[in-house]
Image: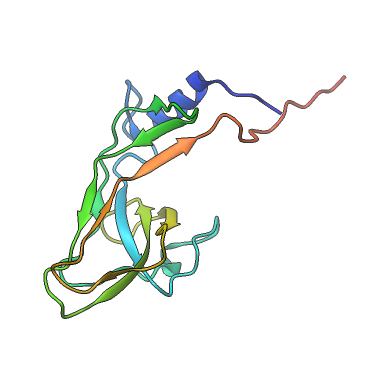
Amino acid sequence: MWQVTYAFLMELLAAAVGHGGAPATGPLFGAWLGLYQQGTPGVQPNSTMANILEANYDGYSRQQIAWFPPFVSSAGPAELAAQDLFFAPTDANVPNMIAGAFMVSAFYGGVLLAGAPTPSGVIPMVGPTSAIKVQPTFQLPPSLIYGSPQWVS
């Protein structure tokens, strides 16, 4: 099994978001964050946007993610963090029960990149006094299995 270095992980993250001279075309560059409602199955490796029941309360809109430069956290993983994103309904006409967030490649439609459930069950978005703050983060721990060299002799 390969043991990768922090330098390698940092280069992967920089390329993913177009920082540090990397071309601004990586899979997380220009990504958007959206919310999904209760009833959405857990996001799996083969999930697509067809599996997502996206939030639809009045005032809802996906928000573009602006990533900070990658860093190595004190816990060890190479990490990307973004600015906080705020979601709040403009009225109480279309309440939603939010079960998670997802990253997608476009403002409308797009390719589903990742999804995560809320940490404490559903969050009611029932009117202007409801709000959710999300800080997108993405980590690449050095302890993952990255394959192995094939020894021929």
Tell me where residue 130 appears, x and y as whole percent. Answer: 20, 66
Q: Is residue 146 left or right of residue 13?
A: right
Residue 124: name its quadrant.
bottom left
Q: Nearer the viewer, residue 18 or 118?
A: 118
Residue 13: name its quadrant.
top left
Position above or below: 71 against 109: above
Tell me where residue 103 appears, x and y as whole percent. Answer: 37, 52
Residue at 28% of width from left, 74% of height from top? Answer: 96
Position above or below: 14 against 92: above
Give the quadrant of the C terminus. Answer: top right
Q: Residue furthest bottom?
A: 93
Position above or below: 92 against 50: below
Labels in figure, total = 0
Residue at 81% of width from left, 23% of height from top? Answer: 151
Tell me where residue 99 appears, x and y as whole percent. Answer: 38, 66
Residue 107: name its quadrant.
bottom left
Residue at 49% of width from left, 60% of height from top? Answer: 43
Give the quadrant of the N terminus. Answer: top right
Q: Is residue 91 left or right of residue 46?
A: left
Tell me where residue 58 appears, x and y as whole percent. Answer: 16, 72
